[in-house]
Amino acid sequence: MTWIVGRIIPFGYAVALSDIRVTLRDDSEVDCLQKIYAVGPFIALGFAGSVAIGFSIVNRLRQLLGPTPPDMAWEPDIVAQW
């Protein structure tokens, strides 16, 4: 089972935590995988399941969000609707 938790904390910051365990085809388990990735200013993506699909989504969101001026940021609600 994968878990990813995010929470806003005081003073304009947030924290995201996840497990790092992956189950291999032979049903063995290894603690080795990062599951939270920055995709844009102030936006991170966490995923579970297919690593190939997860990385495809991370890369696609990074392309869609593209270079953002330093004084601007995407609204997470709008990105989530995509």
Image (cartoon, rainbow, N blue to C red):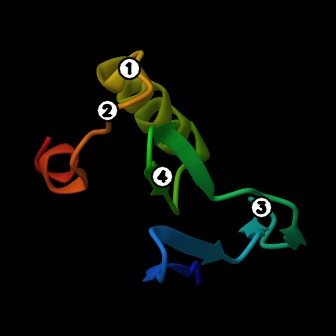
Disc 3 on helix, strand or loop?
A: loop
The picture places residue 24, in percent across and down from the top left corner, at: 77, 61
Residue at image coords 51%, 69%: 13
Of marks 3 and 1, the one in the foreground: 1
Which of the two labelled residues, at mark 3 and mark 1, occupies the earlier sequence position?
A: 3
Judge from the rendering whether residue 11 lies leftward or rightward of residue 36; answer left or right.
Answer: left
Task: Please tell me the numbered disc located at residue 24.
Answer: 3
User: According to the image, label 1 marks what residue?
Assistant: 69
Q: CA distance from mark 3 to mark 1?
A: 40 Å
Disc 4 on helix, strand or loop?
A: strand
Q: CA distance from mark 2 to mark 4?
A: 16 Å
Q: CA distance from mark 1 to mark 4?
A: 17 Å
Judge from the rendering whether residue 35 lies leftward or rightward of residue 23; answer left or right.
Answer: left
Disc 1 on helix, strand or loop?
A: loop
Within 10 angstroms of label 3, few (less than 14), some, or many (20 or more) residues? few
Judge from the rendering whether residue 48 lies leftward or rightward of residue 25; answer left or right.
Answer: left
* Residue type for callout 2: Met
User: According to the image, label 4 marks what residue?
Assistant: 44
In front here: 26 or 24?
Answer: 24
In front here: 68 or 11?
Answer: 11
* Residue type for callout 3: Leu
The picture places residue 2, in percent across and down from the top left corner, at: 58, 78
Which of the two labelled residues, at mark 3 and mark 2, occupies the earlier sequence position?
A: 3
Task: Work out which quarter of the rendered image holds the C terminus and state it.
Answer: top left
Q: Label 1 near label 2: C-beta < 8 Å? A: yes
Task: Please tell me the numbered disc located at residue 72.
Answer: 2
Q: Label 2 near label 3: C-beta < 8 Å? A: no
